[in-house]
Image: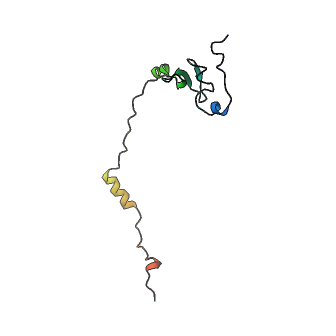
Amino acid sequence: MPRNSRCSRQTTKKYVTRKSPAYPANECCGSRKLGNDRQMYESRRASNGVCRWILASHKKSEKKRSRSPPRKVQKRKSPKKSQKKAQKRKSPKKSAKKPSRKYKARR
């Protein structure tokens, strides 16, 4: 006979819509199951005596991942002063602004 004979998958709305596994935690106390969010959960007994689904720690995957050093961001160099002056000279001259109709004198 299986260890947790009452630990069976539930299909009611309560179990299907939550992130944790679709199994009652009290019937599956001490076991590990895959949750509805595709993460591993472990059923542990809480201080009040009721079992709850708690996200299982991923100690193996944390050790494998090495933190890469931060990338250095290079600053853009601004053009030299002589180049800035040359750009200003090349720009077309602006024509004098025409007065807007709003402020024209009425005759």
- Residue 76 position by quadrant: top left
Whole-percent x, y for residue 87 in the image:
37, 57
- Residue 86 position by quadrant: bottom left
* Residue at image location 55% in from the left, 21% down from the top: 43
Q: Is residue 15 left or right of residue 88?
A: right
Q: How many marks?
A: 0
74 w.r.t. 79: above or below: above
Residue at the outermost front position: 48
Residue at the outermost bottom position: 107
The one of 88 and 78 positioned closer to us in this rendering: 78
Residue at the outermost top position: 1
Whole-percent x, y for residue 105 in the image:
43, 84
Whole-percent x, y for residue 100 in the image:
45, 76
* Residue at image location 61% in from the left, 24% down from the top: 24
27 w.r.t. 87: above or below: above
- Residue 91 position by quadrant: bottom left
Whole-percent x, y for residue 4 in the image:
63, 15
* Residue at image location 63% in from the left, 34% down from the top: 17
